[in-house]
Structures are given as structure tokens and as C-alpha cells.
Amino acid sequence: MSDQRPGGVIVNQGTAFDERARSRSAPVTPIPQQEMRKPRAKKQTRARAARILLTQLVLVGGLLGAWEYGVRTGVVNAFLFGSPSGIWTFLVKGITDGSIFHDMLVTSEETLLGFILGNALGATIGLALWYSPFLERVFSPFILALGSIPIIALAPLVIVWAGTDLTSKVLMSTLSVVVVALLAAFDGARNTDLLEINLLYSMGASKRQVFRMIVVPSSLTYIFSGLKLTVGFALIGAIIGEFVSSSEGLGHAIFIAGNLYNIPKVFASLLATIAIALVFVTVVGKIERFLLPWRKLST
Amino acid sequence: MVFGEDVDQGTLVLDDVSLQVHYGEFVTVVGPSGCGKSTLLNLLSGLITPTSGTLFLDGKEVVGASKNYGYMLQRDLLLDWRTILRNVTLGLEVRGMPGQKARALAEKYLRFYGLDGYEHKYPSELSGGMRQRAALARTMILDPNILLLDEPFVALDFQTKLILESELAKSVADGHRSVLFITHDVEEAVSLSDRVVVMSKRPGRIKAVHKIALGCDRTDPVSARNAPKFGEYVTTIWQQLEIQTSTLDMHGLRSMRLADELSP
């Protein structure tokens, strides 16, 4: 195979022939072929990624520039819309006195706890429903009902039952996550390949073994898409909890600043919220790549 | 093994099918699409139960072949999330063999099937032929006494298919297994089998049974195909399949297509 590596032998025939020689030998040596394609593909991907990033920067820069220009020339009302420089001032202030970090920490803690609790609960119930069609039938209307309640409508009850401190926000966050996580896990379990299940039964497996060796691992992909999706839901739950009753956190900051028409501070807190979401999504992605190493190969 | 008919959503799929497979025998079923070949196999594996008729294993009536049958389909059914090695140990794990022992055994099988060096690759990194070879290793490592194979090589290119046919023939050459092989490839059927069963279109009936005697080494599919009587068998079986297609009227064509669409 050594003559097929990049920069390998078949010299005088040139590249075109080289390509054909490779594809003809494809059935016998599929792996080296894949390895070979990588470098060029990687270069192309990198160039494309750079172009996309550049376009994104130009878009954001253009928008911020136009906004700032509009405010300075008086076309855009700075009182109602704030200005990039105003937001920047608040960001710097928040960072220097540490207040923005404090609020981020509070909201992150609520979000993280709600995210973990909601997903753990949702995934467990979702997978368990595969195990028992009886329970699935019994619970499915309740799950649908819970899933269709706008989460904000539960806030007053949660505050009354769980108080105004951390617990109520975690509960709000959990509630807004749990149904989505449950449906994702159940969907994954239900979409398990029937032939794979039959294969395991043909080996003499018990239902428990089928569950553990086939249903759970093949649902992981779905569960992880659920995880990415529920980052946002966990944040929504926490922030709504803070809106309704709280003394700290980004939701609290946004709520107070909004009532005082402190638009730049609202935007600064929003940016902090987005930052939290991005960190969460990135971490989930990293965990996914670590736990599901076969996935990056198939895409 | 003897069995009867199966009613699949109101359609009679198999009718009055009676077939015995002895230990050490390689029996292939050929027939037009939708003739119930796969239904036959699903009956044997116990995935579906016949509406009437009985299945016998070692003289005892059973539901499904047993807990010790090997099962290979057109799709290799390798689990994406397991490495090749752990795909091969799957059945051993189900049976509770200790990990160390299972791995050692799997490595032996992987070597036999020419997959050493790929132990820690994931299935998505392998070609179709190698994947099906890994599936064969996964099947044979359980030492099944009954092999149910439903067109396992149909998705492979001709060259790879011949290699895998040879590997299958070697795997069952020890002669204490029953193999029921389903295919629509007549040459494949003749080159591998001791007997070829020809089925009619739906409802599937056994139309003819041919005892194949090529007088050569069956583990070499090329020499089997070059055996003097090979062409004769293929032609005879082809003709038996052909009769149905050449005498089709438009109505027949339509019902054939319907049967095709219904067949899994």
C-alpha cells in the first residue's frame, strides 16, 4: 500500500491516473483511501471556516457600527434602544466591580442544577417507558399535559411551595427541562433498530440485556441532542424563576434594569446570559465527543 | 424441521412448505421476490409464529430454532458504538463469559477472518466487506448449530462476495451445523449448497429440490463455479424460476409487484 500514500510512487502518470488507481483498489483498501483524502479536505474545511467566521464578524461589526452611528446622529433613540458604547460601559463596570460575575454565578448554579436534575429524571423515565409499554400507556397523557403547560404559569405555585431562594429556581429550571429530556430519551429508545434487538434475542439475551446493551447506547445520540436543546430550557426556567421573585441573578438584574429603563444594563445582562448558554453548549459538546467517540467518525 | 403456513396481514405467504435440514447440511432456498423466503427464516428464528404448522428441532417440537442459532442478514447489524472487537464479543457478553476470556477468543476469530489490526476500529471505519466479515465472526464465535442466513452477501461487490462465500463455506466445513441460506443468486446457491430448494411465487410452495453434487472443494467458490455440472444446475434452476416470469400477463405482473412491495 505504500505506493498509494500521498507523495507516493506512480510518478509519471500524474495525479489523474493516481486518483483512478485509488478508486479501483477501493474495495480492498478502503481505510488507506480514507486516510489519504483527509489532508486536502481538511485544508478546504479550514478555508471555508475562515470565510464563515469573517462574514460573521463583518455582520456583527456592521450592525454594531450602524447602531452606534445611528445613536450618535440621533436617528436611533438612545433612551429606548441603548447604544453599543453604553452597553460596553456597563459591561466594563460590571466586570470591574464583579457584580456581573456574581449574577452569572447565581444563574449558572440554578441552571446547572436544573439542567442535571431535569435531564437525569427525564432520561431515566424516558428510557424506562420503553421497558414497560404498560407504563407508557398510563403516563403518556400526563406527560403530554405537563409538556403543554407554559412553564411561566407554574412559577407562582413553585414560589409558594419552594420559597424564594435557590430551590424554587432550580425547580423551575428542572420542570422546563424534564419533559423535553424525557421525550428525547423515549424517542431514542423507541427508534432502536428492531433488527439489532432481534439479533441480541437470537443470541439468547434477556430483555434486561437488550435494554442495557442495545436500547440505552443507541438512545444516547437522542439523549445528547436533548441535552443541547435543554440548555436553553434550563436557562429559561432559571431566569423566569428570578423574574418572579429573587434578589440576585441575571434574571433579577434584567428585570430591575428593564423596569428602570436602563436599557444598556439589560443588554449587558443579556450578553452574560448568552455567554452562559454558550459555555454550557460547548461543555455538553465536549462531553458528547468524549462519551460517543464513534459519532464523529460516522459524520 | 417441518412447518406449515403463515398468514401475514391476511396474505397467505407460505403454503404447505415442508422441509428437513440435517446436521452438516447446507440448504439454500431460492425463489422470486415475495415468495416468502424471508418469512420462512423468520419462522425458524421464532421471530414470528406460524398460523398453522409445526417446527421440530432434534425431533422435539419448538417455537423458533432454539437459543443457539446464528443469524445473519443483508445488513451486518454491527453496533455503531462498539469497536469491532466488542462487536464480536457481543454474544459472549450476553452469555456472561468473563471479559478477558471473551476478548482472547474474539481475537482468535478476528485473525481467522483476516480482521486483525481492526480490533479497535469502529464499524463506520470499515468497508462493507470487512463489516460483513466481522458479522460472520460475531456469528461463528457462538458456535451455533443452526445458521439462518438471509441474503447476507447481497450488498457486496462480486469479488468480496466470493471471498466471503469461501469464508462461510470454511466456517461450516466442520460438518456439524445445519445451514439455511436464503438468496436470489442462483450461482451462489449452487456453489455453496448440498441442496437447493426452489420456491414458487406467493403463496410460497416448494417447487423443486435439487441435490447438488459438484465433486469439488466447496470452500473455493471459483472452482465450484468451474465444476463441469455447475452450469447445468444453474440453468435448470434458472428455468424453474424463469417459467413464472415468462408466462406473466399484465395482471400477473401487477400481483408480482404487489407481492414485492409487501415483502419486507
Image (cartoon, helix red, strand yellow):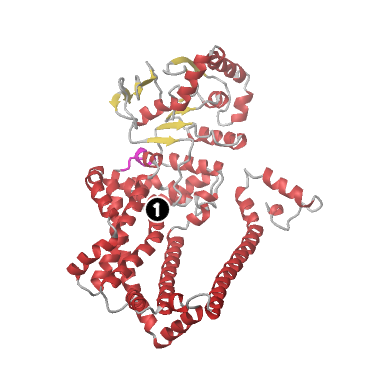
Q: Nearer the viewer, residue A118 or A232?
A: A232
Quarter of the image for residue A207 reads: top left
The kind of secondary structure element at disc 1 is: helix
Can the viewer see residue A284?
yes
**Residue at horizontal 34 percent and vertical 78 percent from the top:** A253
Give x and y (percent) for residue A223: 37, 55
Q: In the figure, residue A275 lies in which quadrant?
A: bottom left
Residue A148, image x, y percentages: 29, 53
Question: Label 1 amino acid?
Answer: Tyr
Please state the extent of the stretch shown in magenta in the rendering: A199-205
Residue B24: in magenta span:
no
Image coordinates of residue A67 in percent, x first then y, are: 53, 74
Q: Is residue B140 above or below residue A73?
A: above
Q: Is residue B218 left or right of residue A37?
A: left
Quick one: quadrant of the C terminus of chain B? top left
Indicate left or right for B171 with B142 as reference: right
Residue closest to the far right: A12
- Marks counted in the figure total 1
Residue visible at 49% across and 24% down in the picture: B33
**Residue that numbered label 1 is attached to:** A222
Query: What quarter of the picture does the N terminus of chain B occupy?
Result: top left
Query: Between residues A226 and B224, which one lies in front from this camera angle?
Result: A226
Whether residue A204 appears in magenta in the rendering, the answer is yes
Please state the chain letter of the residue tagged with numbered disc 1 in the rendered image: A
Kindly give the residue lying farthest to the front in the view shown.
A74
Q: Residue at x 63, y 65 (%)?
A: A51
Judge left or right: residue A8 versus residue B260: right
Q: Is residue B31 shown to the viewer in this render?
A: no
Q: Is B235 drawn above or below residue B82 in the view shown? A: above
Residue depicted at 57% across the width and 28% down the height: B217
Q: Residues within 10 Å of mark 1 (few under 14, many from 20)?
A: many
